[in-house]
């Protein structure tokens, strides 16, 4: 009976861990169903927000890749490493004047780091003011 119970617990643990989508359109192994991203909206062009986000990632860590996702809207995306966390940033136009930036951070074990997301999003906002 104990072995069956342990098998059920092990199966539930395997199902709990999985893949989650990143803001740049890829997948990563992580714990699903938890909040892992922060969004901000600014009256700036996507290019201005993208350059600010790029500078913030370079200042705080390492920029790994840059990409443009083509679809209904052109989404500019960055991937970086900050404080041993994987960080993804996407920038997309909302309307003619407003653009949105989304910051997502995950630990190497697949957990979330909302404090880092919030800090990076705040630094991007401050970079846009200067």
Image (tube, rainbow, N blue to C red):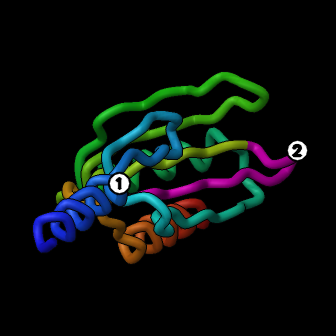
Q: Which residues are magenta?
A: 93-105
Of 77 and 124, nearer the camera is: 77
Q: Is residue 100 magenta?
A: yes
Q: Is residue 5 magenta?
A: no
Expressed as whole percent of the image width and height from the top left, the position of residue 114 reads 42, 73
Residue 10 visible in the picture: yes
Give the residue drawn at x 59%, y 27%: 69
Give the residue drawn at x 15%, y 72%: 1
Q: Which residue, as the protein is rendered here, is positioned at the far top?
A: 70
Q: Which residue, as the protein is rendered here, is positioned at the far bottom?
A: 115
Of 56 and 130, nearer the camera is: 56
Residue neighbourhood size for the residue with mark 1, other residues' Cα within 10 Å, grouped as few (<14), some (14–19), many (≥20): few
Q: Is residue 76 above or below residue 57?
A: above
Whole-Å distance between the Cαs marked 1 and 2? 42 Å
Residue that badge 1 annotates: 15
Quarter assignment of residue 125: bottom right
Q: Main secondary structure of the magenta part?
A: strand
Q: Is residue 74 left or right of residue 83?
A: right
Residue that badge 2 annotates: 96
Give the residue drawn at x 36%, y 52%: 87
Quarter assignment of residue 11: bottom left
């Amino acid at each position: 009976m104990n072995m069956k119970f342990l098998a059920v617990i092990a199966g539930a643990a395997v199902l709990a861990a999985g893949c989650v989508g990143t803001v740049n359109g890829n997948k990563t192994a992580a714990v699903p169903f938890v909040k892992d991203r922060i969004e901000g909206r600014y009256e700036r062009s996507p290019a201005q927000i993208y350059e600010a986000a790029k500078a913030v990632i370079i200042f705080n860590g390492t920029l790994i890749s840059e990409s443009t996702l083509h679809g209904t809207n052109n989404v500019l995306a960055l991937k970086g490493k900050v404080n041993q966390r994987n960080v993804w940033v996407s920038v997309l136009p909302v309307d003619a004047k407003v653009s949105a930036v989304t910051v997502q951070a995950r630990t190497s074990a697949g957990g979330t780091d909302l404090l880092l997301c919030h800090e990076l999003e705040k630094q991007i906002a401050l970079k846009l003011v200067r």
